[in-house]
C-alpha cells in the first residue's frame, strides 16, 4: 500500500445544502457500522485464515498488522469517497521506521485510523476496553497491541517493543483534545521514548471543523465537510535529552520540549488557515506550569505510569 495523500479541494468550503448534510450524516453513520463489521470480518474470517499460514511469531504478527492497516486504508477511502471528509497527509513516507516512536496530538476519534492506514506494521497502545469489545478484541489481540491496563509494566512493554525495532504510535494526551484547547501531554510517552526509541517523530493533526471530539456524539456532524490534515514533523533524537541528565529530569525536559513543539506547530497551522489559536489551560499534569526542581521531578517520575491510549 502506497503512502498517499488526498489533495485538498482548491475551492473554499461552503455551508452544505440540506440534502448534502443529510447525505453526510448517513455516510457518517455508515462509516461507524462498517468499522464494526470490518472488525468482525477480521476476527471471524481474515485473521483465522492468516493464522493458518506458516511463519514465526513475528511474521504472523506482521501479517495481522498489515491486514488491519489495509482495512483502515479502505475505511479512510470510504469516508473520503462518500464525502464525509477530505484529507492531506504530508510526509507519510517517513513513518514506519524501526524503533520509531510516533507522537501525535489527538483532536478526533479517527486520528489513529489515518496513522495505521499509512503504516503497514505499527504497534500502538490501546484502551483496555477494546480488549473486551466483540468488534475489536480479535484484531487488537492478534496484532499484539499494548493494552493500556494501568499496569506499571506497560511502560516497559512499550519500550521493549521499540528496542525490538517495532514502530510505536502514542497519543500522549491520553484522551481527545478538547476543542480549541492546546494539547497537554502526560509524561509517560516521554519516559517510553527515553527508554527505547531510536527516533521520535511528531505528527501534527488538525481537524476543521471539529468532529468526533470527546464532547461530540457521532451524529452531531459539522455543517460542512471536514478537512483532516496530518503533517509529519522533523525527527527528534531522544539521546539529546538523557545524555547528561537522569531519567526523571530527562523525561520532564523532553515532555516540555514536545509541548512547545506542538503548540508552535498548531498555532502556525491555525494562522495559515485563518483559524483561531488554541487556548492553553494550566493542568495538574502540565509540566509547563511546574517548577523544575529535583523533588518535583521525582514525584512526576512516580506519576509517569499514568495510562494513556489511542482510542478514547
Image: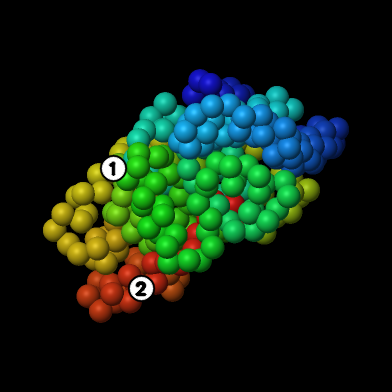
Q: How many marks?
A: 2
Of residues 248 and 17, the one drawn nearer to the viewer in this rendering: 248
10 Å crowding of disc 1: few (<14), some (14-19), many (20+):
many
Image side of residue 271 versus residue 52, left or right: left
Of helix, strand and loop, which one carries label 2? Answer: helix
Q: Tell me where residue 221 appears, x and y as whole percent.
A: 74, 45
User: Would you say residue 270 is visible in this rendering?
Assistant: no
Going from the N terminus, do you reach mark 2 or mark 1 first? 1
Residue 302's disc is 2
Q: Tell me where residue 61 appears, x and y as whole percent.
A: 51, 36
Residue 31's disc is none
- How was this image coloured? rainbow
**Gap in angstroms between the C-alphas marked 2 and 1:** 24 Å
Q: Is residue 8 above or below residue 219?
A: above
Q: Is residue 171 above or below residue 202?
A: below
Q: Residue at x 13, y 58 (%)?
A: 244
Q: Residue at x 50, y 29 (%)?
A: 55
Image quadrant where residue 295 sits: bottom left
The quadrant in which the C terminus is found is bottom right
10 Å crowding of disc 2: few (<14), some (14-19), many (20+):
few
Q: Residue furthest left?
A: 244
Q: Residue furthest bottom?
A: 295
Image quadrant where residue 156 sits: bottom left
Image side of residue 201 versus residue 228, left or right: left
User: Would you say residue 172 is visible in this rendering?
Assistant: yes
Residue 198's disc is 1
Q: Residue at x 39, y 67 (%)?
A: 304
Image side of residue 106 versus residue 298, left or right: right
Of residues 117 and 167, the one drawn nearer to the viewer in this rendering: 167
Q: Is residue 183 above or below residue 267?
A: below
Amino acid at each position: 500500500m502506497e503512502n498517499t495523500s488526498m489533495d485538498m479541494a482548491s475551492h473554499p468550503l461552503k455551508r452544505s445544502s440540506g440534502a448534502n448534510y443529510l447525505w453526510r450524516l448517513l455516510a457518517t453513520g455508515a462509516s461507524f457500522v462498517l468499522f464494526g463489521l470490518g472488525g468482525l470480518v477480521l476476527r471471524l474470517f481474515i485473521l483465522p485464515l492468516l493464522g493458518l499460514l506458516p511463519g514465526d511469531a513475528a511474521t504472523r504478527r506482521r501479517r495481522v498488522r498489515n491486514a488491519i492497516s489495509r482495512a483502515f486504508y479502505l475505511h479512510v477511502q470510504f469516508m473520503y469517497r462518500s464525502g464525509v471528509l477530505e484529507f492531506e497527509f504530508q510526509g507519510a513516507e517517513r513513518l514506519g521506521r524501526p524503533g520509531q516512536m510516533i507522537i501525535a496530538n489527538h483532536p478526533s476519534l479517527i486520528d489513529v485510523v489515518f496513522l495505521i492506514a499509512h503504516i503497514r506494521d505499527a504497534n500502538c497502545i490501546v484502551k483496555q476496553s477494546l480488549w473486551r469489545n466483540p468488534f475489536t478484541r480479535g484484531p487488537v489481540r492478534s496484532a499484539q497491541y499494548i493494552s493500556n491496563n494501568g499496569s506499571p509494566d506497560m511502560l516497559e512493554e512499550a519500550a521493549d517493543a521499540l528496542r525490538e525495532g517495532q514502530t510505536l504510535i502514542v497519543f500522549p494526551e491520553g484522551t481527545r483534545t478538547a476543542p480549541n484547547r492546546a494539547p497537554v501531554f502526560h509524561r509517560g510517552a516521554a519516559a517510553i521514548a527515553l527508554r527505547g526509541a531510536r527516533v521520535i517523530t511528531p505528527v501534527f493533526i488538525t481537524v476543521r471543523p471539529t468532529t468526533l471530539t470527546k464532547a461530540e456524539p457521532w451524529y452531531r456532524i459539522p455543517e460542512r465537510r471536514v478537512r483532516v490534515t496530518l503533517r509529519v514533523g522533523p525527527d527528534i533524537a531522544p539521546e539529546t535529552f538523557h545524555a547528561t541528565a537522569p531519567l526523571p529530569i530527562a523525561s520532564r525536559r523532553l515532555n516540555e520540549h514536545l509541548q512547545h513543539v506542538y503548540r508552535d506547530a498548531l498555532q502556525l497551522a491555525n494562522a495559515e488557515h485563518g483559524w483561531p489559536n488554541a487556548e492553553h489551560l494550566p493542568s495538574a499534569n502540565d509540566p509547563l506550569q511546574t517548577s523544575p526542581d529535583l523533588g518535583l521531578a521525582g514525584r512526576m517520575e512516580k506519576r509517569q505510569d499514568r495510562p494513556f491510549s489511542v482510542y478514547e
